[in-house]
Amino acid sequence: MGHDFLVLAFAVVIVGGMGSILGAVVAALLLAQVHAIASLWIPPVWAETLVYGVMLLVLVVRPAGLFRRMGEA
């Protein structure tokens, strides 16, 4: 119960950057749009997989997330 929300929240924190509130907000909006648009053309189960693919892509390109925590080099 609530497992889907917990895993998506984890994806949002990872994509946004640990400790970055602005990054979490931007990542939440981005991943929600990816999920919603993908659900139009593919089944919702596969749309969640696409969200995790976006998370993996962000981790490969920017390992610290979209927005790093303020004060870190």
Image (cartoon, rainbow, N blue to C red):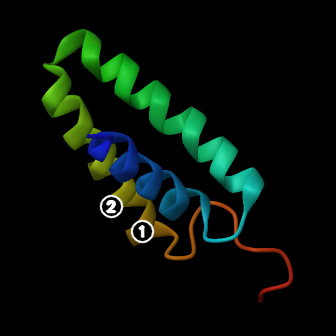
Expressed as whole percent of the image width and height from the top left, the position of residue 8 reads 39, 46
Q: Residue furthest bottom?
A: 73
Are the residues tagged 1 and 2 within 8 Å (C-beta)? yes
Above or below for 29 versus 67 = above
Q: Relative to 59, is 53 on the left or the right?
A: left
Q: Nearer the viewer, residue 58 or 44?
A: 44
Give the residue displayed 61% in from the left and 66% down from the top: 17
**Mark 1 neighbour class, 10 Å CA radius: few under 14, some 14 to 19, many 20 or more:** some
Q: Residue at x 38, y 19 (%)?
A: 36
Q: Between 4 and 72, which is closer to the camera in this rendering?
A: 4
Mark 1, secondary structure of its residue: helix
Q: Position of residue 15 (x, y in %)?
A: 51, 58
* Residue matched to label 1: 59
Work out whether 13 lies above or below 44: below
Query: Which quarter of the rendering shows the C terminus?
Result: bottom right
Q: Amino acid at mark 2?
A: Leu
Spot occupied by residue 7 in the image (x, y as percentages of width and height) = 34, 52
Q: Which residue is mark 2?
A: 56
Q: Quadrant of residue 51?
A: top left
Query: Farthest residue toward the front?
Result: 1
